[in-house]
Amino acid sequence: MSKLLEKEYQLTGRLQQLATEKDDTFRLRTEKANYLVKVSPPDEAQEVVGLQTAAMRFLEGAAAELPVQRVRLTVDGCDNVVIKTKDDGTRILRVFIFVEGAVWAQTNPDGGQIAKVGEMLGRVDVALAAFAHPADRRALVWDLRHFHELTDLVEHTANAEHRQLAGRVFRLFEGAVVPRLGELETQVIHGDYSPYNVVVDEQSDDYVTGVIDFGDTMRSAVIFDPAVSLANLIGRVPEKPWRDACSFVAGYERTRPLKDRELPLLPVAALARLTLRALIANWRAERVPERRDYLLAHAKDDWINVERSLAVPLSDVVAQLRGGPSSGGTSSVWS
């Protein structure tokens, strides 16, 4: 690895491996700067890796003011290096500028700061509207367009109450979102604008100082992009489970207003994303027994947040997202 980096990038320094879900990822510390080095997994197609890199480079050119992580080019001006493996396969090596700072998940932002996180995603989505790539219609389990087709995942959830919650969300999505899938505005989206993929600086007026990890970039419904963020916000404040989500949407709409017919679908999509994450965690727990306790503990938190969020009437949630008063009702109408 070190020899390849020196040959292709003229970079030398100390490599430190980082824990990530798919890629082999390293932090490279050199005398002048820090970099992030990624080697794609053997089963990831070159075209998909190319999509991720192309989206980042497009944003650097089309919206240079956005703090999107930058791609470091090789000495020959390429944005990646193809590595041949022993089994005649290929892996893709890429180098990025390392974005210093804390990620959003490591902070406790107030409503105004959450709104700024939402505003930044709105700006990214506006810029990505003009981007296209041959691989942008990739199939991805996290693409909520296919959520209603994943009901078999419920079989891997042993807890009866959790299975009931999942059933409610599937029925809600089937009734509210599926009939309108063909009408939703689509484009390439970030796909995983989560608290771990946003770098922030609490001392900065901008708050958001980095947007990283385009690994789930795809063409899908635009409302599914903020839905990812909302899935990480709903339920966290037990007495006001949608409060932080409303702050995020308020910020997002400063730069990319949502269509009136699509806004009521956003909370349903957020619940679908949160439910999908819990279901996949349960599914993985069966297949990776050594991580079972860890995965189920995190899934439990997700189910708690699903239940809290479902306790608020949908009409009230939509009213809150629109910035208006709620009815004050206490019974759920999500069924």
Image: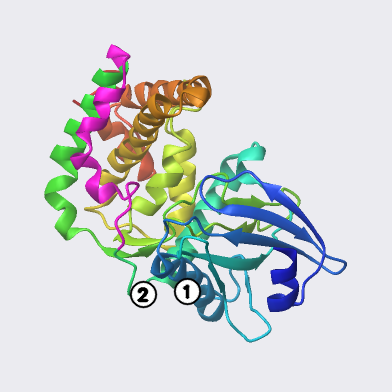
The magenta segment is 138-161
Q: Is residue 27 above or below residue 162?
A: below
Q: How is the image coloured?
A: rainbow
Q: Nearer the viewer, residue 49 or 150?
A: 49
Q: Circle 2 is placed at which residue position?
A: 133
Q: Residues within 10 Å of mark 2 (few under 14, many from 20)?
A: some
Query: Given the current orientation, which residue lies at the most extreme right position?
Result: 31
Amino acid carrying label 1: it is: Ala
Q: Nearer the viewer, residue 62 or 43?
A: 43
| Location of residue 309 (image quadrant) | top left
Q: Are marks 1 and 2 in contact (CB under 8 Å)?
A: yes
Task: Name the spot of residue 220 as percent of width and height, x first.
Answer: 30, 59
| Location of residue 173 (image quadrant) | top left
Q: Is residue 58 left or right of residue 206?
A: left
Q: Which mark is residue 54?
A: 1
**Res. 167 in view:** yes
Q: Earlier in the sequence, mark 1 or mark 2?
A: 1
Q: Nearer the viewer, residue 72 or 199?
A: 72
Residue at x-position 39% and y-position 70%: 47
Residue at x-position 22% and y-position 58%: 184
> Does 186 lie within the magenta span?
no
Task: Name the spot of residue 196 as percent of width and height, x first.
Answer: 58, 45
Q: Residues within 10 Å of mark 1 (few under 14, many from 20)?
A: some
Tell me how far mark 1 sits from mark 2, CA to CA: 8 Å
Q: Is residue 90 above or below residue 195?
A: below
Q: Is residue 284 above or below residue 222?
A: above
